[in-house]
Image (tube, rainbow, N blue to C red):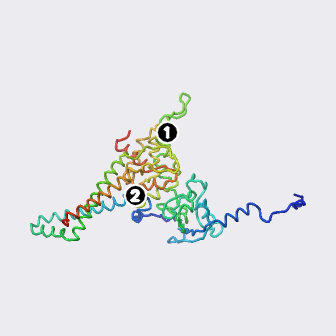
Amino acid sequence: MEKDRKEGIKGMANPGRYGIERVAYWLMRITGLGLLFYFIGHIYETSNLLDGKAAWNSMLELTQTTEGHIFLTLVIGMCVFHTGNGIRLMIGQAGFGLGKPSRADYPYTPSSLNMKNKLCIYVSIGLAALAMMYGLGVMYDV
Amino acid sequence: MTKDGALPKGFERPSRSPSQEKYEKVKSSSKTTTLRISKFNPESDSTSTFSEFKVHYQRWTTVLDAILEVKSNYDHSIGVRYSCRQATCGSCGMIINGKPRLACFTKISELDSDLVTVEPMNNFPIIRDLAVGFERLIATHKRIKPYIIRDDSEVTSETKEFLQSPEDVEKYIQFAGCIKCGLCNSACPTMATDSSFVGPQALAQAYRYVADNRDKGKDERLKIIDEPHGIWRCHFAGSCSQVCPKGVDPAMGIQLLRGYLLGYRK
């Protein structure tokens, strides 16, 4: 009789509505999935060692192309953001850095979404951007 | 005034009463917006459609006022649930311009848009148009035992009421403000994909009772929420706290509750 109005995956795909915390949630999911795929690819890549030196070298050649460099740069960014934001989440989810519960007074600013948390998110994004730039510099010998 | 309703000599009936004049003045100074209302009847429709209406609004006109004006004058069939009109009953939660809000607590002038789109809340079954079913929300709320659990009775001939210091009250009073409007569950990204998730409303209420020093049901409640679709599915996106109209901050309650399960809190 009733139609369940589930937001589904598209609810995750529209992160801007709820502030930087929701953007961080979305990035955390995307980078987590990206790193999972990288991990699987990495196992496949290193398994080529078993086929001898020539196979291993030809596999490494793939990372020496422009596409390979872009891919590795993205991996660096995903890794740094996921680590930085992950540390913030682990601390927050253990109940630290959220402020103290107190009587709610209008205009109701949520204490758990405080500046410390926002700053950690911005720092994680900033560090990821810096690491990507450094990685690009190393790969392109700048 | 005489018995037959005529005014005494020397008095004149004004052409328009002061209240009518005020109404005319207010109407002439009002702005106009387009209200898009989602329409869906699960008994006859397969998809939602939108009906558009031009409505006048003032600085103080709420979205609920506008919906009720449309319902009174243009389309009586609009399904909407409301009661108190003062953000106390939690009945009129809906998606307004993409975000879950209370219609009675959202002024059209605050939205800063020429188009106001209202839809039923996400992650709830639709009863009709803007009204959604709260059965699941109430069921999960009941599941976490939202009452003080004690072996002894609070009032006996020998004991007095349980005294609490202001500091003890501060630990949970924020979470006692929940009006069960469901906005937090509607905004939650986990609720969007996991139908079995307990949800931020129930988890915040679990914290409210666990943090209450009169309560002795902490272990019982922690056991209920410590399951695969329980507290561990929260990823601290904070959207529940962003949309709460009463400043409950469910995200904080959930993380503090996790502190109990991880052993950081006693």
Q: Please state which amino acid type lies under the numbered disc 2.
A: Ile
Q: Which residue is mark 1?
A: B169
- Residue drawn at x 19%, y 63% is A138
Q: Position of residue A135 (x, y in %)?
A: 22, 62
Q: Please state which amino acid type lies under the numbered disc 1.
A: Val
Mark pair 2, 1: CA separation: 31 Å
Given residues B210 and B114, the one toward you in this image is: B114
A128 relative position to A53: left or right: right
- Residue drawn at x 50%, y 53% is B138
In the rendered image, the quadrant that contains the C terminus of chain A is bottom left
Residue situated furthest left in the rendering: A53
Disc 1 is placed on an element classified as helix
Q: Position of residue B17 (x, y in %)?
A: 77, 62
Q: Position of residue A89 (x, y in %)?
A: 34, 51
Q: Position of residue A9 (x, y in %)?
A: 39, 64
Above or below residue B229? Residue A10 is below
CB under 8 Å between callouts 2 and 1? Answer: no
Q: Which residue is mark 2?
A: A20
